Amino acid sequence: MSPDLERLTATFGDAFGGAADGVWTAPGRVNLIGEHTDYNEGFVLPFAIDLAARVALRVRDDGVMRLLSTAGSESGITELSVGDLRSDRAKGWSVYPSGVVWAFQERGIDVPGFELVLDSDVPLGAGLSSSHAIECAVATALNEVTGAGLDAEELVLTTQRAENAFVGAPTGIMDQSASLRGRSGHAVFLDCRDQSVELVPFDAAAAGLVTLVIDTRVAHSHADGGYANRRDACELGAQVLGVKALRDVSVDDLDEARGLMDETTFRRVRHVVTEDQRVLDSVAALRGSGPAGIASLLDASHASMRDDFEISCDELDTAVEASRAAGAIGARMTGGGFGGSAIALVPDDDENRVRDAVLAAFAERGFGAPRLFTVTPADGARRLA
Ligand code: ADP
Ligand code: MG
């Protein structure tokens, strides 16, 4: 048994006595390319990472949910009733399993009570979707113990429903799709209009590269307002152009679009339209020349988010510039923006130099130290034991 699994099993025994019915896992994700394209019905290219949430779960027949996380900050067992779930009553991380139970119930699935221990190595708030990892692990466990038999697409929609209607976050389907449908050695090419998924080879290691995540550890306060404002601009752009969503606009249409709207709205539109094309180009590059083929697309994506969509910040720009100067072949901010993480594609031999350069650049500018780690594409949610 792996040390992770041993720790989880031991914690379960200490907290609840005896053994769990099983252990299920779901990974976090990183988005390789395709930012702010999801709600424009466009394309994204995330991959499931080798950092995951694991839940040990045992069914109870009294409708009581007892939840415990191994993370120190929120210790103690939370007790809730599956018959009486309300988002305003769920405290801390219990909102995620509660939301999943609620969304199962909404589909008419009878969910029994259960004891659950959560152990996760997805860093919190780094933009790697630690919250979706919890939801997807719980959903995968409940899907099995209730005999609901939902397929991957249904699980995606169920966890999205939990997130939108119970947790209260207006997110799309990218995070769940990566966590539930990811595959080792592959990125998940997702069409956000029809939810279709194609697995695309992304084997950085075989190409002598690592995917380095640089978590800036900052979350700027204008993130929420900035997100809503960007969504509004995209909606306005689509309306002016007479299309259902910006997905329906091609790069060739941009010249004409420029004259039809104000300069800021045009730049927002240009980001989304060119970003969709960069995702398509990345998929073609990965299928053709391999991971190194997307390096310049990562750079172009960052420039577009910095200059046109205006969602970068000094810390993210520093992460990108310092890693590129020290040997990364391509780099970009990833996630919603205004903080969170950047990713850099780095030749094996340059990894230490890039790490040192990023740390030095942050120190020089008086920023707090970023967290640096590498990720590789991993399998999606599944039963572990
Ligand atoms: P992200 O999903 O980008 O990591 P979020 O703010 O959406 O950031 O989710 C972070 C939240 O997920 C935390 O505030 C916490 O409630 C919950 N969480 C994540 N991992 C754990 C864990 N191991 N134990 C308890 N709660 C966790
Ligand atoms: Mg989250």
Image (cartoon, rainbow, N blue to C red):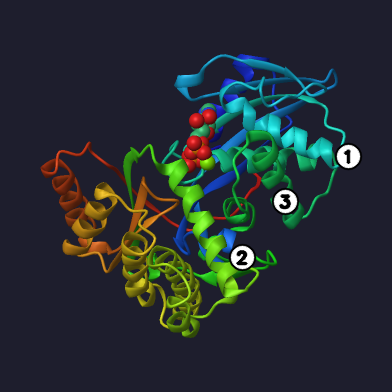
Q: Which mark is residue 157?
A: 3
> In the image as oriented, which residue stretches furthest toward the left?
364
How dense is the environment of label 1, judged by Cα within 10 Å: few (below 14), some, or many (20 and up)?
few
Q: Earlier in the sequence, mark 2 or mark 3?
A: 2
When the figure is inspected, residue 58 is found, relative to residue 200, above or below; the finding is: above
Residue 203: where, in percent of width, then height?
A: 44, 68
Query: Disc 1 marks which residue?
Result: 108
The answer to whether marks 1 and 2 mark residues whose Cβ atoms lie closer than 8 Å is no
Q: Quadrant of the C terminus?
A: top right
How many labels, in total? 3
Residue 385 visible in the snapshot:
no
As shown in the figure, which amino acid type bears the numbered disc 3? Leu
Q: Residue at x 78, y 55 (%)?
A: 151
**Is disc 1 placed on a helix, strand or loop?**
loop
CA–CA distance between discs 2 and 3?
15 Å
Amino acid type, callout 1: Gly
Determine whether the residue tagged by mark 3 lies in a helix, strand or loop: helix
**Ligand 2 within 8 Å, label 1 CB:** no
| Mark 2: amino acid | Glu
Mark 3 to mark 1: distance in Å?
A: 14 Å
- Please report the residue visible at 62 percent of the width from the left and 56 percent of the height from the top: 177
Q: Name the residue at 20% across, 54% down.
A: 352
Above or below, 112 against 52 in this view is above
Give the residue number, with chain letter if any, for mark 2: 41
